[in-house]
Image (cartoon, rainbow, N blue to C red):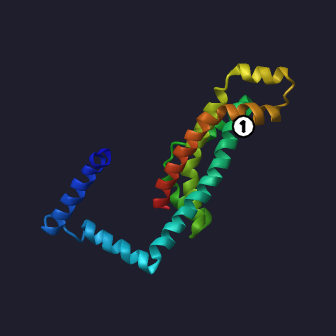
Amino acid sequence: MRLARNSSGWVVIILAWQALTTWGLVSSFLFPSPLDLVEATVELLLDGSLVRHVGASIERVLVGFAIAAIVGVSLGVLLGWSRLVSDILRPVVEALRPIPPIAWTPIAILWFGIGNAPSYFLVFIGAVFPIFVNSFAAVRNVDRNQINAALCLGARPALLIRDVLVPASLPVIFPGLRIGLSVGWMCVVAA
């Protein structure tokens, strides 16, 4: 019953869309009907081009996102842990962060040429900042009692970061990764 209620809005929209194109109230050239879209999808599936292009998009998102995850989490943990590094690098990150990923397209083409590399870069640029912001905030907000307890037990900085800061930060880092992945999918369209 709930599925029927949740999908009823979509059914009404699709039926209205089909009616508008069938009756000629909307140009089917500019706004093809749902049936035309289904026919085109079947045709692209049969000739294999849809699977090939979807695979290429998935590859671009996964490569760009993987690089963004590594850089964003590492940079967020580093800047969140070290005030000195944060004071030096955070102004640069904050200056680049508001630039929309789409605005990087000409630079990506100049730097990387034509091919997959500019696409990886645009997905990276779109995904890295949400990941960085969440990682940075997560490390900065770790309970100081956990850090003090580890220090009292003789934890060195590497051990402290690996065994205390990162595990305590994961509940905030993972939503940043999720947001970064969704922004990466939006960027792949422009890429």
Helix, strand or loop status at disc 1: helix
Which residue lies at the image location 59% right of the left edge and 34% below the top edge?
172
Above or below for 44 versus 159: below
Q: Nearer the viewer, residue 139 or 19?
A: 19
| Quadrant of the image containing the N terminus | top left
Q: Number of numbered discs present? A: 1
Which residue lies at the image location 60% right of the left edge and 34% below the top edge?
171
Q: Position of residue 113 (x, y in %)?
A: 59, 68
Q: Position of residue 124 (x, y in %)?
A: 59, 53
The reply to whether residue 61 is visible in this rendering is: yes
Crowding at dot 1, Cα within 10 Å, few <14 / some 14-19 / many 20+, comes out as some
Above or below for 21 versus 10: below
Above or below for 125 versus 164: below
Q: Position of residue 181 (x, y in %)?
A: 54, 50
Above or below for 147 versus 177: above
- Name, please, the residue furthest toward the front: 1
Q: Position of residue 125 (x, y in %)?
A: 57, 51
What residue type is disc 1 on? Leu
Q: Quarter-wise, where is residue 29 in the image? A: bottom left
Q: In the visual, does 44 lie left or right of 131?
A: left
- Name, please, the residue furthest toward the bottom: 47
Which residue lies at the image location 44% right of the left edge and 80% below the top edge?
47
Which residue lies at the image location 46% right of the left edge and 60% below the top edge?
189
Q: In the visual, does 189 lie left or right of 147?
A: left
Residue assigned mark 1:
78
